[in-house]
Image (cartoon, rainbow, N blue to C red):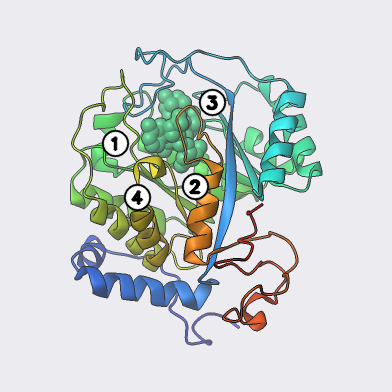
Amino acid sequence: MNPQDAGLPATRHDWTPEEVQALFALPFNDLLFRAQTVHRQFHEPNTVQLSTLLSIKTGACPEDCGYCPQSVRFETGLKKEPLMEVQAVVEAAREAKAGGATRFCMGAAWRSPKDRDLDKVETMVREVKALGLETCMTLGMLKGTQAQRLADAGLDYYNHNLDTSPEYYGKIISTRTYQDRLDTLEHVRASGMKTCCGGIVGMGEAPADRAELLRQLANLPAHPDSVPINNLVQVEGTPLKGGEALDPLDFVRQIAVARIMMPKSAVRLSAGRTAMSDELQALCFLAGANSIFYGDKLLTTENPQNARDRALLARLGISVQGAGPAAEPAHADVDPADVSDGLLTPAGPGCSAGVCG
Ligand code: SAM
Ligand code: DTB
Ligand code: SF4
């Protein structure tokens, strides 16, 4: 049955700038109500997906992305590291799985991988998958043949962000174009891998740029399967250090509008959580975020400690996707019918959030 038949909103790819700006202009409560309504039509509302990140090749990147601590052009004090050995990556993946993550995301500070790098990277994909984890990689721009090699190795997701609007892009990055990003995304879709594509807010962009970023994402030929929304982590030495931070409620609006425009996608509350209060993150979940990066580190910067996240999810009664077969509810207000698909573990005070213990 297609969504229209089921009375669900259609998945659209023809958003106009005016329509998107009208969503952002809604009163906050109306916007969150709409976002939460859409969220409940397409997703289990009290479940979050956990992805753990690992930087498999760190620093010395030739690109000049103004937000990034890994660019060779900025003095950020970051220690560069060559491509990791496969066994060290597998060990980190094993730990991520033991910690409760279901997806392992491997990032490399490359403009684009060399064909010869892909031999080792393909082995990483195969061995991490063999642990029973979903795999994601973000390695920079890909040629069609490279995307196909990764797909053939079994890579589930490829992350490649549009980052901002086409209009603001040139203020942040000069070493590659928006079209380069779109071309890589096209190769990834053609290879059959799932796409993970989002952006960063809080880089000094105008509200119209934030709206346009979401319009670009939603008007892609297929909505990204996963949409990371990053709040800029300001790193000493990068050109964007010292800029004005985004109003936290505008960050929540970004999540809510993403949820409405890309109703079936996982919307990931991504970088920037360390600086967010529990209450702000709770609003992001209410706005439709249903995925987070889980683990003490993002690529090179801090992420909330696992214990803080476990406590937050438990306080909110949010379960973890894929945490194993549903256990006996530990308290009366959890209806077993709500946790019966085997993906969910009931959560709440005094019971497991799927990541506790
Ligand atoms: N080099 C590859 C590329 O740029 O596609 C992959 C790694 S790159 C670090 C992955 C993404 O991390 C970027 O597209 C950007 O959205 C995000 N990112 C990098 N630095 C960030 C920061 N300081 N704050 C928030 N997000 C950041
Ligand atoms: C994404 O959108 N955010 C992640 C992941 N995809 C690769 C990376 C965030 C990086 C934050 C800065 C750092 O830790 O280096
Ligand atoms: Fe390099 Fe990616 Fe950082 Fe840009 S975002 S400098 S491409 S690692």
User: Which residue in the structure is indicated by mark 4?
Assistant: 277
SS for callout 3: loop
SS for callout 1: helix
User: Which residue in the structure is indicated by mark 1?
Assistant: 169
* Quarter that holds the N terminus: bottom right
Quote the CA–CA distance across marks 1 and 4. Answer: 29 Å
The numbered mark, 4 or 2, whose residue comes first in the sequence reads 4
Instruction: Sort mark 3 into few (<14), some (14-19) or many (20+) by Cα contacts within 10 Å.
Output: some
Q: Amino acid under label 2?
A: Arg
Disc 2 residue: CB within 8 Å of ligand 2: no
Instruction: Sort mark 1 into few (<14), some (14-19) or many (20+) by Cα contacts within 10 Å.
Output: some
Q: Nearer the viewer, mark 1 or mark 4?
A: 4
Q: Position of residue 310 (x, y in %)?
A: 55, 52
Q: Quadrant of residue 342?
A: bottom right
The numbered mark, 3 or 4, whose residue comes first in the sequence reads 3
The numbered mark, 1 or 4, whose residue comes first in the sequence reads 1
User: Which residue in the structure is indicated by mark 2?
Assistant: 308
Q: Residue furthest right?
A: 130
Quote the CA–CA distance across marks 3 and 1. Answer: 19 Å
Q: Please, is residue 1 above or below residue 191 in the view?
A: below
